[in-house]
Amino acid sequence: MHNVVVLGLQWGDEGKGKIVDYLANQADVVVRFQGGHNAGHTLVIDQQVYKLSLLPSCIVRPGKMAIIGNGVVLDPWALFKEIDTLTERGINISPKNLAIADNACLILPLHAELDRHREELQGGNKIGTTGRGIGPAYEDKVGRRAIHAGDLLQSDFLKQRINNLLSHHNALRQGLNMPLIEENVLFNQITDITHRLTPFVTSTVQLLQHYQQQKRHILFEGAQGALLDIDHGTYPYVTSSNTLTGQVFSGAGFYGPAAVLGVIKAYTTRVGQGPFPTEDLGDIGQKMREIGHEFGTVTGRKRRCGWFDATLVRQIVRLSGAKGLVLTKLDVLDDFDKINIGVGYEILGKSYDYLPSSLQLQQQAKPIYRQVTGWKSSLKGCRDWSKLPTAAKNYIQVIEEFVGVPIFMISTSPEREDIIVRQNVFSL
Ligand code: GDP
Ligand code: IMO
Ligand code: MG
C-alpha cells in the first residue's frame, strides 16, 4: 500500500504525532487534511521534544514534503510562530518542504476572539474549546464567507472578501457587545503577512496528483480524534471538523487507495467537557494522569483519564475502516494490579454494545468492564514483542479480539524508536 491514513480513534492525544513521525521514515509526503492549531502533536527524538500544531509531523525529517491541505483552517500567525521556533532549533522550513493549499481557509484574530468570547458567555455550558478560533473559522467556511490563503495574492479581491466577511462579523459583534472591526485595519493586518505566507501557497491538489503519479508514499495525518468528529463524535462536545476517513479525500483533495491505521491509547483521555463513560475521577484516573503526563499539549489543561473503552474503539474501527491499530502508552499501565477494559454499557437499565448518539443517553452510560491481570513490570522502551510479559500480551489480545482488527504496532515510550512493529502497514 502506497498511502496510509493515520487517525486518532478516541478523543485525541492518542500519540498520532509520534506514529506519523515514525512512519514518515518510509513516506515521501505527509498531509494534514483537517483541524488547525487546536492539534498538539508531540515528537521526542533523542530526548529532544518537538510540539507541532499545524506543521505535519514529518517536518523534522529532512527530504520529506509537508502539505497543509484545504481542509485545514490555517492561522498564519500561529504558523509563523511554529516555523520560527523550529528554525531556531535548526530545522529548515521553506517552500521546498512545505506547501499550503491555496483553498485553505484562514483563521483570523477575530475568530479566536469570538471563540473565547462565546465560551465565556456559555459559563457552565461551555464546550471547553482550545480557544484558537477553530469553530468560528469553520462556520465562515460553510457560510461561504471565509478568506482563502490564495485570496492574499489579489489585493482587490481580498478587499471584497474582507468587506463581505466583516458585514457578517460586525453585525454579530454588535449583538455580542464586542468592538467593531474596521476593514482597513483587517486588510493591513493580512497584507502584513502576505509576503511571508504566499511563497508556500500553491495548488496542493495538483501537487498530490503529481506525487500519486510518481507512486510516492503519502501519509495522511489526522488531528483530534474520532469521538471529536462533528458528525460521529459526542456532539455538541466535539471539534468543528470531520476527523474520520471521508475527510481525507475532501480535506486533501486526493482520491486513491489508502490503508487506514487507527491510533489508540492503552487507556482513555479527554480534554474539555462532554461525556466520557469510563472516566475515573478517583485514584486510578489520577495515577494515569501522573504516570502518563496527561496535560494538554496546546492549553496545558489536565486531561481527564479512565480505562480503555473497547466498545467505543470497536464502533469507530467499523466507521473508519481501520485495517489495523497502533496501541500507544502501554508502559503507563505498568504498575496496575488489575486492568479494566470497557466492553459495553448499561444505560437506563438497558444494555448496549455501542454508544448511542443521543447526548442524554451518553451521559447516563455506565460501563461494563472485563478485568485482566496487570503485568507489574516495566515495558518502558521495549522494542521486541518476544520480551513482552504474558499478561501484557494477553491485554493486547483481549483488545484485538473484542475490537476485531489486529494491533500492528505498540508504542512503549515517547521516544521515536521505542516501538514494537508486528506488521509494516506500507506492505499491506
Ligand atoms: P497526539 O495529539 O495524538 O499527537 O498526542 P499528543 O502528543 O498530544 O499526546 C501524546 C503524549 O504521549 C505525548 O506527550 C507523547 O510524547 C507521549 N507518548 C506517545 N507515545 C507514548 C508511549 O508509548 N508511552 C509514553 N509514556 N508516552 C507516549
Ligand atoms: P490532537 O490532534 C484533544 C478538543 C478541545 C475541546 C473540543 C473543541 O492533539 O489530538 P476546538 O478548539 O477544536 O473547537 O475544541 O475539542 N480538542 C482536542 N482534544 N486533542 C486534540 O488534538 C484536540 N483538538 C481539539 O479540548 O474539547
Ligand atoms: Mg495532542
Image: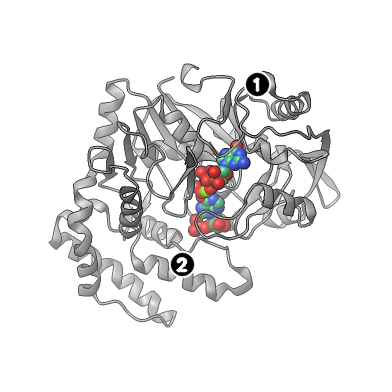
- Crowding at mark 1 (Cα within 10 Å: few <14, some 14-19, many 20+): some
Q: Amino acid at mark 1?
A: Trp
* Residue 144 versus residue 180 in the image, above or below: above
* Residue 259 as seen in the image, left or right of residue 149: right
Residue 7 locus on image (x, y percent) = 52, 37
153 sits to left or right of 378: left
Q: Nearer the viewer, residue 228 or 47?
A: 47
Between the residue at mark 1 and the residue at mark 2, the CA separation in whole angstroms equals 46 Å
**Rendering coords of residue 341 (x, y %):** 77, 38
Q: Secondary structure at mark 2?
A: helix
The residue that appears at 37% across and 30% down in the rendered structure is: 255
Amino acid bearing label 2: Asp
Q: Quadrant of the N terminus?
A: top left
Q: Identify the residue at image location x=68%, y=47%.
A: 291
Residue 408 is situated, as x and y percent measured from the top left of the image, at: 59, 24
Is label 1 in contact with label 2 (beta carbons under 8 Å)? Answer: no
Q: Is residue 57 above or below residue 288?
A: above
**279 relative to 227 in the view: left or right:** right
Assess mark 2: CB under 8 A from ligand 2? yes
Q: Residue at x 71, y 30 (%)?
A: 399
Residue under pointer 2: 115
**Residue bearing the label numbered 1:** 385
Q: How is the image coloured?
A: one colour
As drawn, 100 above or below 208: below
Q: In the figure, residue 249 lies in which quadrant?
A: top left
Assign a secondary structure to mark 1: helix
Residue at the extreme top of the image, as rendered: 427
Q: Is mark 1 within 8 Å of ligand 1?
A: no
Nearest the camera: 56 or 121? 56
Residue 230: x, y in percent?
A: 52, 51
